[in-house]
Amino acid sequence: MQNLTTCPVCGGESSKKVMDCIDYTVSRETFSIVQCTKCGFKYTNPRPDDKEIGKYYESEEYVSHSNSKKGLINTVYHWVRNYSLRKKVELINNQAKKGNLLDIGCGTGEFLSTAVANGWKGQGIEPNDKARYQAISNHKLNVLPESGIASLQNNNFDVITMWHVLEHVHTLNERVLEIYSLLKPGGKAIIAVPNCTSYDASVYGKEWAAYDVPRHLYHFTPETMKALFRKHKMDFVQSYPMKFDSFYVSMLTEKNVHKQNRLLPAFLNGFKSNLKTKNDAEKYSSVIYVFVK
């Protein structure tokens, strides 16, 4: 296990434990989430190091690396994903002219292949061998392993995306620095992460499925996301909501806690969560942030 002694965002040396969460997906182990007393950033600590973390992804229940449609939650996830792919491509089209796109943590390549079909020149990075193989074999994409990011040319990408990936990265500051270096001047970083200040997070507390310990190493708020990128000389441009995430996360939470699919309470909590936002993008269950170099 790796124990962080300083805050990844501000470098503060003092933190307090705010909750213990269970890994419902794979191990049933308990992990602590702490909060920096200086900037308020929450992160999983201690945590598995980069050599230990792989075993915590080894489950069909972990949807992001799987194309399985077994079970209700996987089925819903894949149905929503197909709609969301189109909306994501619309978003990047609105933020930049079609050019070079890098999708870090591209999984099985669904978003990247959709963007390429829309006219983008796509490149992917994916550390999971099985997911990377599927992206290459199913979609004929150019996808490199994690180590391949060092071979990419600086100042080369118009857009870099990370869809629910940044919260998984052990070397957080190094990754943001890499994004800055790889982007062209004026290039955009488009980053989606869960929002631990959302209404559904407050309702479910430590059971909220988007804490997803230990795979989620960091638990962002709008303030801490902006602080992290500001630290690395990237300016905030705009935020967008991910409106389906409150429903999906609520469904997953209900299943984790009650060991069965409870659609009605999940739907109601998801609906309430979106209603409580009053259309403020930064109050949704997950938020997409756009930063510019």
Image (tube, helix red, strand yellow):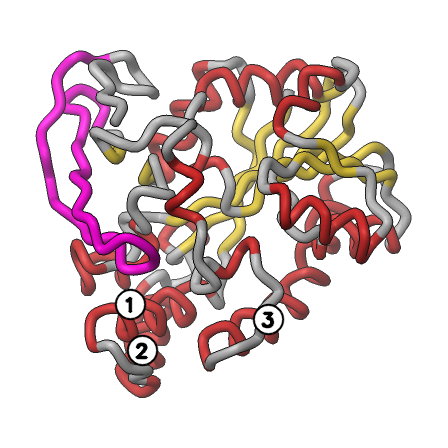
Where does label 1 land, which residue?
253
- Please identify, in this view, whether the residue under mark 2 or under mark 3 is nearer the observer: 3
Q: Which residue is mark 2?
A: 266
**Mark 2 neighbour class, 10 Å CA radius: few under 14, some 14 to 19, many 20 or more:** many
Q: Nearer the viewer, residue 41 or 281?
A: 41
On the question of residue 239 being in view, the answer is no
- Going by the numbered disc 3, the residue's amino acid type is His
Magenta range is 12-40
**Residue 82, above or below 184:** below
Q: Which mark is nearer the camera, 2 or 1?
A: 1
- Residue 46: x percent and y percent? 21, 29
Q: Which mark is residue 38?
A: none
Q: Earlier in the sequence, mark 2 or mark 3?
A: 3
Residue 200 shown left or right of residue 234 in the figure? left
> How far is mark 2 from mark 3, CA to CA?
18 Å
Image position of 133 with respect to 114: above or below: above
Cβ atoms under marks 3 and 1 closer than 8 Å: no
| Mark toward the start of the polypeptide (2 vs 1) | 1
Q: Which mark is residue 78?
A: 3
Are the residues at dot 2 and dot 1 in contact (C-beta closer than 8 Å)? yes
Residue shown at 68%/44% (left/top)? 132
What amino acid is labelled 1 in the image?
A: Thr
Q: Is residue 160 magenta?
A: no
Q: How far separated are the C-alphas under marks 3 and 1?
A: 18 Å
Q: Earlier in the sequence, mark 3 or mark 1?
A: 3
On the picture, is 26 further left or further right than 125?
A: left
Q: Quadrant of the C terminus?
A: top right
Residue 272 position by quadrant:
bottom left
Where residue 124 appears, as percent x and y from the top left, is: 72, 37
Where residue 207 sits: x, y (%)? 20, 60
Q: Is residue 14 above or below residue 249?
A: above
